[in-house]
Amino acid sequence: MLKVIDLFAGIGGIRLGFQEAFGNEIEFVFASEWDKFAQNTYSLNHNDTPHGDITTIKEGDIPNHNIILAGFPCQSFSIAGKRKGFEDTRGTLFFDVIRIAKYHKPKVIFLENVKGLIGHDKGNTFTVILETLEELGYKVFHKVLNSKDFGVPQNRERIYIVCFLDKNIEFEFPTCVQPVAKVQDFIKDRVPPKYEYIGKTIYPKLEFEVTKPNTFYQWRRKYVRENMGGVCPTLTANMGTGGHNVPIILSKQGIRKLTPMECVGLQGFPKSFTYPVGMSDAQKYKQIGNSVTVLVIKEIALDIRKSLLSK
């Protein structure tokens, strides 16, 4: 059985994808997440309470493992570009992944981040990340994938990095695996009135612009636009605060925003997923917006499993 650790775990989206792909062939032996609200959601859904801030946990105190999962935050690499590999990552959260991998030397490292990581600091940051992983002895594969190519109607591009300690292993990322589901498959006919826009200051503009059912629109702070291709705009952490990219729909109930649980579906989470009782909508939106599309993770994990079995 392969032992797995889940770093920057959020609400466990990456974990879910790997569990669906590997089944009882893997065992999670450690998780870390600093946000207390995300910890509560993770604990409720996985029966496993994450440890806190990974920067305060010594690598020797983490159980032995074969796979590292890490959707690490993309913070500034203050000296990235000097091409010092491992040394360039110090002071970043990516360094915590590296120091743990350097100590334990797992068979696989799986990383996920926003697409913009590739161009950060004119590409220097991404170069340092790849060079650091290779310096550690890993064979590295990376690719940008979009959630809309994996059965959910959400335009969400992310960079995925898969690293194998065995340099003889071959690996290919998955391609489009199924047609995009229809909008109406994710939208409920009736939701609580608090999600409706009628009676709010913005409503007259929305009434003029949001006219088609089974269509996703975006609130862009100063205007509304129809999202092309029949897919939802990228779900973000600020959906609960009326931020830049709020998805809007015209349902049988009228013009409204998506509910947190509809967003859960648009991230490919199972129907059994739930939030703690009493959690605010702002926290729910933040957590699912910061998470991953489980169906994409599952397909990558299936190919990782195939590569491991081939050896």
Image (cartoon, rainbow, N blue to C red):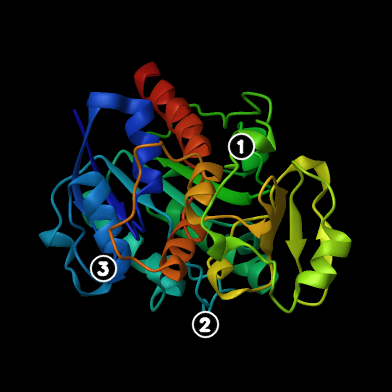
- Badge 2, how many Cα within 10 Å: few under 14, some, many 20+? few
Q: Earlier in the sequence, mark 3 or mark 1?
A: 3
In the figure, residue 87 lies in which quadrant? bottom left
- Badge 3, how many Cα within 10 Å: few under 14, some, many 20+? some
The quadrant in which the N terminus is found is: top left
Picture residue at 36% right of the left edge, 35% below the top: 18
Seen from the viewer's position, the closer of residues 46 and 262 is 262
Say which residue label 3 marks. 54
Q: Nearer the viewer, mark 3 or mark 1?
A: 1
* Image position, residue 296 (x, y; %): 53, 37
Q: Which mark is residue 152?
A: 1
Cβ atoms at labels 2 and 3 below 8 Å apart: no
- Badge 1, how many Cα within 10 Å: few under 14, some, many 20+? many
Say which residue label 2 marks. 78
Picture residue at 64% right of the left edge, 23% below the top: 178
* Image position, residue 297 (x, y; %): 47, 38
Q: Earlier in the sequence, mark 2 or mark 3?
A: 3
At label 1, the amino acid type is Val
Picture residue at 44% right of the left edge, 43% below the top: 163
* Image position, residue 55 (x, y; %): 27, 73
Residue furthest bottom in the image: 78
Seen from the viewer's position, the closer of residues 184 and 148 is 184
Q: Earlier in the sequence, mark 1 or mark 2?
A: 2
At label 2, the amino acid type is Ser
> In the rendered image of this protein, does residue 30 appear above or below residue 15?
below
